[in-house]
């Protein structure tokens, strides 16, 4: 394959639609108050496809617990927001933090649904993520967000 063939291949592959959405919200001052929601919206156009949903959480090494309780809300177009409580395991005392770490910052991506699911309605979906731990504020959480990926 010549130089122009490689250029054409790169251009074609770069024109493909990305079947991924990720939106992370910074937690002000790394102090997550229970009233603060990491929130956003995403567009669903393909109601025949299945999607994997996941939480993306960034915290520092100084985070005090091995888990975090979240209240995750999802709202379909023209519907009310429906919440579910989620207990995310972040690590354990024997093996340390899960996820990817750099210096004292850790990023964790955890699935919300065991199997990919379909969205029945096309349109804009809203999400909100609240922390529901006993600490007020919950310290050393840097950001929280949602990842939506079209299943292959």
Image: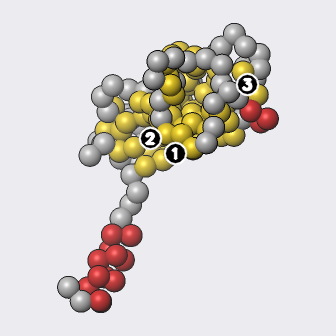
Q: Nearer the viewer, mark 3 or mark 2?
A: 3
Residue found at the very far right of the displayed protein = 29
Identify the residue at the far front of this view.
Answer: 94
Nearer-N-terminus badge (3/2): 3
Pointer 1 with pointer 2, Cβ within 8 A: yes
Which residue corresponds to mark 1? 22
The earlier-in-sequence mark between 3 and 1 is 1
Badge 3 is on which residue?
139
Q: On screen, 25 above or below 4? A: above
The residue tagged 2 is 148
**Left or right, 24 with reference to 36:** left
Q: State the SS at label 3.
A: strand
Of tags 3 and 1, the one toward the viewer is 3
54, 40: nearer the viewer: 54
Looking at the image, which residue is at 29% across and 89% down? 3
Question: Callout 1: helix, strand or loop?
Answer: strand
Left or right: residue 5 compared with residue 148: left
Q: Quadrant of the N terminus?
A: bottom left
Q: Is residue 71 visible?
A: no
Find the distance from the CA under tag 3 to the CA under tag 1.
Answer: 23 Å
Residue at point 43% right, 49% down? 20
- Provide residue 95's location: percent of width, then percent of height: 45, 23
Q: With respect to residue 75, does 42 lie above or below?
A: below
Helix, strand or loop status at disc 2: strand
Residue 59 percent location from the top left of the image: 63, 32
Relative height, residue 85 to residue 106 (above, below) = above
Residue 103 in the image, given as x and y percentages of width and height: 61, 42
Tell me the CA gap for discs 1 and 2.
6 Å
Q: Residue at x 68, y 27 (%)?
A: 62
């Amino acid at each position: 394959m010549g130089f122009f063939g490689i250029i054409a291949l790169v251009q074609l592959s770069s024109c493909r639609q990305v079947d991924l959405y990720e939106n992370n919200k910074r937690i002000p001052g790394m102090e997550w108050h229970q009233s603060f929601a990491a929130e956003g919206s995403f567009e669903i156009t393909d109601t025949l496809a299945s999607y994997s949903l996941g939480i993306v959480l960034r915290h520092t090494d100084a985070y005090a617990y091995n888990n975090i309780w979240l209240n995750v809300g999802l709202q379909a177009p023209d519907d009310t927001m429906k919440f579910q409580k989620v207990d995310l395991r972040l690590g354990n005392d024997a093996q340390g933090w899960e996820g990817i770490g750099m210096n004292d910052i850790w990023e964790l991506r955890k699935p919300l649904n065991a199997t990919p699911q379909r969205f029945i309605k096309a349109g804009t979906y809203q999400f909100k993520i609240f922390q529901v731990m006993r600490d007020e504020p919950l310290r050393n959480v840097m950001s929280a967000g949602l990842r939506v990926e079209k299943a292959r």
